């Protein structure tokens, strides 16, 4: 297991790389260039980023994310140009040592929450929160306005202003889109990019829908084991993998997260993992919790054991953290609680290695 940390680049992330390096056991980043979907990442900028990360004593083997242009998801004729850019970006990243590219295929909305700083009454910290009841009252345009307002001036991943400016048009263009048609467009994309990945030694890792069910009537096709079985069959290759996010899949209590890890781990189809905990509050109603098992409803030991048993060499990172100790910053991506999360997951890992005795 390689422990990594999500980082948005020195212009966009208030956390210095030296702080990331000081978290015990941190091997590298899940990082990115801040580019709109559809852009071919310039080699010079990739090189500069990788050199900066290496100079801090960290690895840069996982990119999160290279976003997929909406025209590709909708299957518009313009998609070929954007797919070409995507393939070129894969080649550039491979040249600088990248092994895994995380992405998602969610229409319009990436992750979605109804409150970015819900106070947790037990201890006064706050975390990301979702209640579908609130969403019904708000509607897509209102939730976008609120999310932008609450993000402390940071552009949130998946909520880039240039994408959301076109929201009304994009929502209209998706009218009539079915899960099967979305999967056809997904296959078209994978058929183009996976052979490039195979050639240059990169694995694509598809992040689940978050939360793990359809929203605003838009089709979503990556939120269960069955969904991922279909995605893998769209283009069967070791390069077509899952970014198994325990909190996203775990937002639906019907998903048995350790069992899903074992299923895809045994198939060698896990490219990367996000490991975090979720507290269920009701139907389609949850908040994010500290990583510790007892702080939420996921069994973090069973999750780490499934990784140990079936995909012990994968990249993982602590995922969203709460805001604690008066920290302010990008919602979900403060330093302190994610560092605590990494330390806790590393502790579980050390215990597993001792118990199972082979590392
Ligand atoms: Mn995730």
Image (cartoon, rainbow, N blue to C red):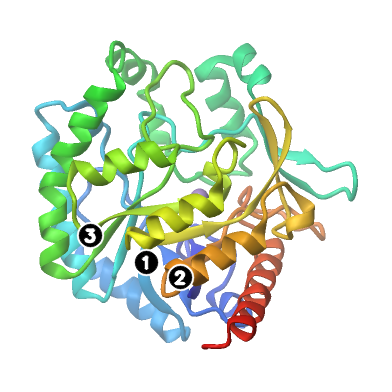
User: Under tag 1, what secondary structure?
Assistant: strand
Residue 314 in the image: state x and y as whole percent: 42, 69
Confirm or reject: label 1 Cβ below 8 Å from ligand 1: no
- Is residue 12 toward the left or the right of residue 328 in the image? left
Label for residue 92? none
Q: Which residue does the numbered mark 3 point to in the structure image? A: 239
Structural crowding at the residue carrying mark 2, measured as other residues with C-alpha within 10 Å and reported as few (<14), some (14–19) or many (≥20): many
User: Under tag 2, what secondary structure?
Assistant: strand
Q: Which residue does the numbered mark 2 point to in the structure image? A: 29
Q: Nearer the viewer, residue 102 or 86?
A: 102
Label for residue 62? 1
Q: CA distance from mark 3 to mark 1?
A: 14 Å
* Disc 1 + disc 2, Cβ < 8 Å: yes
| Rendering quarter of residue 163 | top left
Residue at 50% across / 66% down in the picture? 307
Q: Earlier in the sequence, mark 1 or mark 2?
A: 2
Residue 217 in the image: state x and y as whole percent: 43, 15
Look at the picture and state if 29 lies above or below 322: below
Structural crowding at the residue carrying mark 3, measured as other residues with C-alpha within 10 Å and reported as few (<14), some (14–19) or many (≥20): many
Does any portion of residue 208 appear in the rendered image? yes
Badge count: 3
Residue at 13% across / 37% down in the picture? 188
């Amino acid at each position: 297991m390689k422990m990594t940390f999500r980082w948005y680049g020195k212009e966009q992330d208030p956390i210095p790389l030296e702080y990331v390096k000081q978290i015990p056991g941190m091997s590298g980043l899940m990082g990115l260039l801040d580019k709109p979907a559809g852009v071919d990442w310039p080699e010079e900028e990739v090189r500069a980023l990788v050199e900066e990360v290496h100079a801090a004593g960290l690895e840069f083997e996982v990119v999160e994310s290279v976003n997929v242009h909406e025209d590709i998801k909708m299957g518009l004729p313009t998609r070929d140009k954007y797919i070409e850019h995507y393939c070129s970006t894969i080649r550039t990243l491979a040249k600088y040592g990248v092994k895994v590219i995380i992405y998602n295929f969610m229409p319009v909305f990436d992750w979605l929450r109804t409150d970015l700083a819900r106070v947790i009454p037990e201890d006064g910290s706050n975390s990301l929160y979702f209640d579908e009841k609130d969403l019904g009252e708000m509607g897509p345009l209102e939730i976008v306005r609120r999310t932008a307002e609450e993000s402390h001036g940071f552009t949130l991943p998946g909520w880039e202003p240039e994408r959301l400016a076109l929201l009304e048009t994009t929502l209209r263009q998706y009218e009539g889109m079915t899960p099967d048609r979305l999967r056809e467009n997904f296959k078209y994309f994978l058929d183009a990019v996976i052979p490039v990945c195979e050639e240059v030694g990169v694995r694509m890792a598809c992040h689940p829908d978050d939360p793990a069910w359809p929203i605003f009537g838009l089709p979503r096709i990556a939120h269960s084991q069955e969904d991922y079985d279909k995605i893998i069959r769209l283009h069967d290759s070791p390069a077509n993998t899952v970014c198994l996010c325990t909190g996203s899949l775990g937002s639906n209590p019907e998903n048995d997260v350790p069992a899903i890890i074992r299923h895809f781990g045994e198939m060698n189809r896990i490219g990367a993992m996000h490991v975090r905990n979720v507290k269920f509050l009701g139907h389609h109603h949850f908040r994010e919790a500290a990583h510790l098992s007892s702080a939420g409803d996921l069994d973090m030991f069973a999750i780490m054991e499934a990784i140990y048993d079936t995909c012990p060499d994968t990249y993982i990172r602590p995922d969203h953290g709460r805001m604690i100790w008066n920290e302010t910053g990008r919602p979900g991506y403060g330093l302190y609680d994610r560092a605590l999360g990494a330390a806790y997951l590393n502790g579980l890992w050390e215990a597993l290695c001792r118990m199972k005795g082979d590392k």
